[in-house]
Image (spheres, coloured by chain):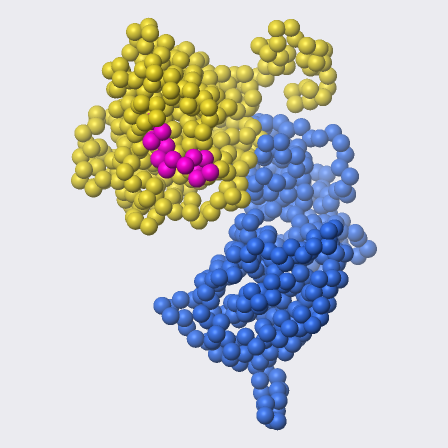
């Protein structure tokens, strides 16, 4: 039964990452139909099927790193059991992989394990073998409850792996402190409620906060700098590139609004809207994923009362915007209902002291209390 | 690689990037509807559909080759998606006696002279069966190093002239090649000796990741012709009829003993440089997307229908049969027997060194792919 092995997709590419599968086990597949998407350090490409038949087994899960020559999928010919002539043979590398094999497949071609589609997905993502699961459903069908990874070690892959490495790296480098202020956002919400001229897109709280932060960066360039750790020199950036943390199905991405220091509010808003959509659709280009000089993390409705955002090293500071809610506030000696949100600023204490950071945050709050000045 | 649906063969309206770049370039499809219809009807009866069929065959080859590369059947491959008009016109505007000097991006051009597509595909597979019959098809072996085919073309053309043959040589190239020394030497010599040669340069604005602005300070590559004392023609590279006219005019000049011509086919690279390239790393893909409406097959289809020379069904059938002819080419490639491994060292060394001796080549690490 033909197995399709990962070819050299670039010039001298030795491995790739399975980005996503476009076919599933048991499904039929036509010649040239896209089987999967593979990312290499050269390009991300779709792989069309050389075979026609039924998908017998998918041999590598989304997120797996696969070597050139490694089998990715096994296809059962639709023309009885006759082996389809393989258009090519790619030889598997002789060296044994040091990684623990996961998602082991059944030895035979028959007896596909009955399982809910959601259970199949979870098994694939946890690296569990459906064959070994004891199905508690009707007729032994495997459900989600049967797939608890008790006592197992599951390798982090793809974005999970990147997050684990990146977060540890930041923590190793940056002694950081967070300062927090509560901000009355009634005036901000009033601006947001307005429609722009020419029926342009509405301003969002992220847009206004970003605009306010940019003014702060002009006033206090140290927040738009990085540290040369060896020479202990502060490197001031040439331009303001704002990183926006966006939660996507692939994990947290930082989309970068390039050179946005001089953009007017609506121009900035349009750029942020574009980046957020691109991030959610996985369409950010490599330059858009790098190069931020200051980062903003807006948690939206799930922003929590407050949090200590991690400094997006090598940036020196990250601004957090937290949940907006009605809170009791004191005005003119009276307790009234106010619209409030907390702002947090985490900063690299090697370079920035608490007073400077507080000053930046107080000034930012002042700008948000009178947001019409930000609308130029 | 799906084509956008086309309603008009015309150029993009003002504001689109093409409008500015293509200003002053020779065009047929960009003319008023009445004159472009008149032009198509003035051509020999078979020609418009022949040009379209040639482009459809080139497209089918290119799409199949990309699939084969993704499947590991062939190695790295430079797609020419969007360059079909230039290639089809370059071949069909000449006679079969004229010489073609392709680069790595025109490996399918030889199929328009009757060579089976399996041959260039075997070449991309690294198989010696990939050598087409150079003398039979009058198509030179492909040149991968940039601009090296230009001097070859000049030599062939000059030689033909000295022998009194009425033969023209056409060399394909790209914008990046005009910065290479060989381009200068070839153009200069061709003009000096009056060689009947055509330099057909597709300016698609990108030499892999190098934009034309970092390639040259000349805004129109055709202007370079003046420095050599030959005419330069700028033509819309997505307009097969205009490209045909440009090449035919250059060929007529060459045959009349008036020497070489530089043709700059202006356009934009619609796809990646090749299968190992990710253009989003270095260029604004939204900008590239604006050019999609210029895709030459769709544009030609619209013009043929407008002129009443074909209907949609007929054109679709031409595309489908071109694709169908290559659908299972992978099987035919796989069925081509592999040559003995000793051949890898043939024609390389006068005395085969130990490292390429049959004993060495038969060590397991070499034959594992066998």
- Percent x, y of residue B89: 32, 27
Q: Let me know if residue B197 appears in the view.
A: yes
The residue positioned farthest toward the right in the image shown:
A151
Side of B269 relative to B192 (left or right) = right
Side of B114 relative to A319 (left or right) = left
In magenta stretch: residue B213: yes
Q: Give chain B's shade.
A: yellow
Which of A154 and B140 lies nearest the eye of the viewer?
A: B140
**Chain drawn blue, letter?**
A
Which region shows up in magenta? B212-225
In magenta stretch: residue A344: no
Which of A237 and A86 lies nearest the eye of the viewer?
A: A237
Which of B3 and A84 lies nearest the eye of the viewer?
A: B3
Q: Assign the N terminus of chain A to one quadrant of the image.
A: top right
Q: Quadrant of residue B140?
A: top left
Residue B267 versus residue A176 in the image, above or below? above
Residue B95 versus residue A66 in the image, above or below? above
Q: Quadrant of residue A100?
A: top right
- Percent x, y of residue B173: 42, 27
- Residue shown at the point (44%, 49%) measured from the top left: B286
- Percent x, y of residue A210: 54, 66
Which of A64 and A21 lies nearest the eye of the viewer?
A: A64
- Residue shown at the point (62%, 87%) measured from the top left: A328
Residue A78 versus residue B350 in the image, above or below? below
Q: Across the whole image, how many numbered discs are drawn on residues? A: 0
């Amino acid at each position: 039964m033909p197995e399709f092995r990962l070819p050299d997709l670039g010039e001298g590419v030795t491995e790739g990452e399975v980005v996503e599968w476009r076919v599933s086990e048991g499904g039929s597949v036509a010649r040239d139909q896209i089987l999967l998407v593979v990312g290499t350090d050269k390009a991300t490409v779709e792989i069309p099927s050389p075979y026609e038949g039924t998908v017998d087994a998918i041999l590598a899960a989304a997120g797996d790193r696969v070597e050139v020559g490694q089998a990715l999928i096994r296809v059962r010919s639709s023309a009885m059991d006759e082996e389809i002539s393989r258009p090519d043979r790619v030889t598997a590398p002789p060296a044994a992989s040091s990684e623990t094999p996961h998602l082991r497949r059944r030895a035979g071609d028959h007896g596909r394990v009955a399982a809910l589609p959601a259970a199949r997905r979870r098994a694939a993502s946890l690296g569990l073998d459906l064959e070994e699961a004891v199905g508690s459903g009707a007729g032994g069908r495997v459900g989600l409850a049967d797939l608890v990874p008790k006592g197992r070690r599951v390798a982090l892959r793809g974005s999970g792996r990147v997050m684990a490495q990146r977060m540890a790296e930041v923590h190793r480098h940056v002694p950081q402190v967070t300062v927090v202020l509560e901000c009355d956002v009634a005036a901000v919400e009033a601006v947001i409620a307005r429609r722009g001229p020419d029926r342009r897109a509405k301003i969002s709280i992220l847009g206004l906060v970003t605009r306010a932060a940019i003014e702060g960066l002009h006033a206090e360039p140290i927040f738009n700098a990085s540290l040369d750790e060896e020479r202990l020199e502060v490197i001031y950036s040439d331009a303001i590139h704002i990183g926006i943390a966006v939660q996507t199905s692939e994990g947290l991405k930082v989309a970068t609004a390039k050179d946005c220091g001089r953009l007017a509010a609506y121009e900035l808003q349009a750029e942020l809207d574009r980046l957020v959509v691109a991030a959610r659709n996985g369409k950010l280009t490599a330059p858009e994923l790098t190069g931020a000089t200051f980062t903003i993390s807006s948690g939206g409705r799930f922003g929590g009362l407050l949090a200590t955002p991690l400094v997006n090293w090598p940036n020196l500071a990250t601004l957090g915007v937290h949940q907006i809610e009605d809170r009791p506030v004191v005005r003119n000696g009276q307790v009234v209902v106010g619209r409030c949100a907390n702002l947090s600023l985490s900063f690299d204490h090697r370079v920035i002291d608490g007073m400077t950071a507080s000053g930046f945050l107080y000034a930012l709050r002042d700008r948000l209390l009178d947001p019409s000045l930000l609308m130029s | 690689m799906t084509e956008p649906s086309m309603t008009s063969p015309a150029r993009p309206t003002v504001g689109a990037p093409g409008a500015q770049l293509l200003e002053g370039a020779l065009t047929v499809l960009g003319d008023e509807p009445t004159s472009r219809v008149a032009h198509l009807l003035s051509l020999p009866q078979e020609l418009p559909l022949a040009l379209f069929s040639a482009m459809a065959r080139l497209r089918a080859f290119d799409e199949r080759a990309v699939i084969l590369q993704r499947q590991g059947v062939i190695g790295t491959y430079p797609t020419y998606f969007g360059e079909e008009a230039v290639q089809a016109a370059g071949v069909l505007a000449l006679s079969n006696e004229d010489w073609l000097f392709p680069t790595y991006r025109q490996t399918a051009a030889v199929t328009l002279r009757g060579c089976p597509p399996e041959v260039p595909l075997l070449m991309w597979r690294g198989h010696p069966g990939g050598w087409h019959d150079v003398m039979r098809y009058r198509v030179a072996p492909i040149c991968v190093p940039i601009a090296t085919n230009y001097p070859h073309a000049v030599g062939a053309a000059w030689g033909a002239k000295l022998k009194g043959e009425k033969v023209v040589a056409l060399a394909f190239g790209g914008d990046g090649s005009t910065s290479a020394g060989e381009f200068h030497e070839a153009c200069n010599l061709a003009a000096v000796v009056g060689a009947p040669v055509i330099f057909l340069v597709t300016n698609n604005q990108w030499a892999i990741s190098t934009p034309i602005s970092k390639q040259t300070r000349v805004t129109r590559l055709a202007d370079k012709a003046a420095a050599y004392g030959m005419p330069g023609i700028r033509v819309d590279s997505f307009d097969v009829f205009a490209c045909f006219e440009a090449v035919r005019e250059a060929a007529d000049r060459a045959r009349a003993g008036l020497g070489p011509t530089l043709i700059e086919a202006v356009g934009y690279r619609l796809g990646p440089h090749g299968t190992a390239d990710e253009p989003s790393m270095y260029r604004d893909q939204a900008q590239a997307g604006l050019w999609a409406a210029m895709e030459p097959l769709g544009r030609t289809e619209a013009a043929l229908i407008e002129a009443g020379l074909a209907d949609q069904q007929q054109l679709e059938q031409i595309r489908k049969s071109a694709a169908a002819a290559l659908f299972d080419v992978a099987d035919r490639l796989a069925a081509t027997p592999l040559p003995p491994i000793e051949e890898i060292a043939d024609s390389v060394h006068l005395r085969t060194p130990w490292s390429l001796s049959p004993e060495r080549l038969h060590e397991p690490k070499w034959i594992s792919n066998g």
